[in-house]
Amino acid sequence: MLNQEKNRIALISVTGDPAAQIGKEEAGGQNVYVLQVGLALAKLGWKVDMFARRNSPEQSAIVQHHPNCRTIRLTAGPEEFINRDRIFSYLPEFVKAFQKFQHREGIQYSLIHTNYWLSSWVGMELKKHQPVRLVHTYHSLGAVKYRSVRDLPDIASTRLATEKACLETVDRVVATSPQEEQHMRALVSRKGAIEVIPCGTDIERFGQISRQEARQALGIAEDAKTILYVGRFDRRKGIETLVRAVGQSSLRDRENLNLIIGGGYRPGQSDGIERDRIHGIVKELGLDDITSFPGRLGRSNLHLYYAAADVCVVPSHYEPFGLVAIEAMASRTPVVASNVGGLKFTVVREVTGLLAPAKSDRDFAEAIDRILANPEWGSELGTTGRLRVELAFSWDSVATRLAYVYNQLLSEPIPVSTPSPAVAA
Ligand code: UDP
């Protein structure tokens, strides 16, 4: 007898392992989202299984995060790190491993929430063999990303076709910002059902410590004008814009300037290469003395860096949502962000921070300088940012809204249908 409990859900995130260390090896917002949504749903009484691809033989096959929430790692392809652009051909193995897992455990999921286009392909394949409701979050849209990429990867056409099939056939697509919804409609398809539910942040982890205490803990001087970047080392994150902004004379002449660029990297890999490139620009501009690279920030120190900063800068070329901005806001730190995508939604101009055109060193320099020049205004922006996050972006509120959608879908009979053919692997 198959167990098809109503409050059971599978979150599939082939490439974004929720149990991974965040901040390196392509592990960023998607991993955080899946884990936090999973945990918050478990608190609401859901039985949550999160599935990712195993990328090292040392990784445990199952990680239990909470009595009702676990990560299950399935073997699909070699158990080693594989770049996202090369995973597609291993997806049929992932589908088989998922089906075997269901069989072994005597479970059949009636509800699957997939994350990133690769997982949507898995979801659509599974739907050919079992009655299931599918919900999908893109996290990044090829249709947006490829607009600014000169050499398209070989996988580009498959990704675009899968994203379109997904939007047109799954039961609900979750856009994390109204801007992402607009992009889906303008660039992917007019068909399909979209619900806007934002990402969240941990309001108990961030915002519990004062700037002074955080600075003491990190050894940052009280009078240091601290500018913080947090995130992966990837060209599209626009770290170069931030460094060049700090290099503008309006800013660099300020006393006690302190630039912190936080994020993990692996020497010789794409993030290590970008980190070296950024360090090269830091040296070229003579900013070595005021710049530090503390590496990956984690459980023990991320909240301290956010609290210690006078301003947190998110200079991305594009973000469908951008968790770092709301983490900084939850920590009462004003944000200067690119005027793009989800950042236009989370950061309220002149109220919780400032927005500047992406890639514009001069505008970023001006915005950062305005905040550093007026610390009282900076803390007002920070206080309002915290309020905005409490009202709109806690994981509990996000999970409650997702659960509402899930329950709606599960209350209707699930048709045993075959979606329009996804792209063959
Ligand atoms: N992050 C982290 N440690 C680091 C760098 C990043 O924990 O050293 C986390 C960061 O706090 C955020 C996530 O990685 O939760 C990045 O998410 P975001 O949406 O900003 O960007 P993405 O990586 O998804 O492009």
Image (cartoon, grey):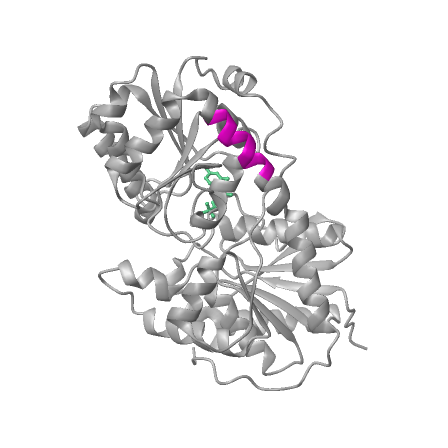
**Residue 384 visible within the image:** yes
Residue 380, percent from left and from top: 51, 27
Which residue is at the front of the view, 136 or 355?
Answer: 355
Q: Magenta stretch containing residue 383, yes or no?
A: yes
Furthest residue to the right? 1
Quarter of the image where the C terminus is located: bottom left
Residue 260, percent from left and from top: 38, 28
Q: In the image, is residue 397 above or below residue 247?
A: below
Q: Is residue 249 left or right of residue 259?
A: left
Q: Magenta stretch containing residue 261, yes or no?
A: no
How many numbered tags mark residues here? 0
Which residue is at the front of the view, 79 or 11?
Answer: 11
Which residue is at the front of the view, 20 or 261?
Answer: 261
Residue at image position (60%, 47%) is 392
Range of the magenta residues?
Answer: 378-387
Q: In the image, is residue 71 above or below residue 98?
A: above
Residue 50, percent from left and from top: 63, 58
Furthest residue to the left? 284
Residue at image position (67%, 54%) is 399
Asked which quadrant contains residue 299, the reply is top right
Dominant secondary structure (helix, strand or loop) of the stretch shown in magenta: helix
Q: Is residue 87 left or right of residue 1?
A: left
Quarter of the image where the N terminus is located: bottom right
**Residue 139 visible within the image:** no
Q: Is residue 163 left or right of residue 40?
A: left
Q: Is residue 338 left or right of residue 66?
A: left
Residue at image position (48%, 41%) is 324
Residue 235, percent from left and from top: 30, 47
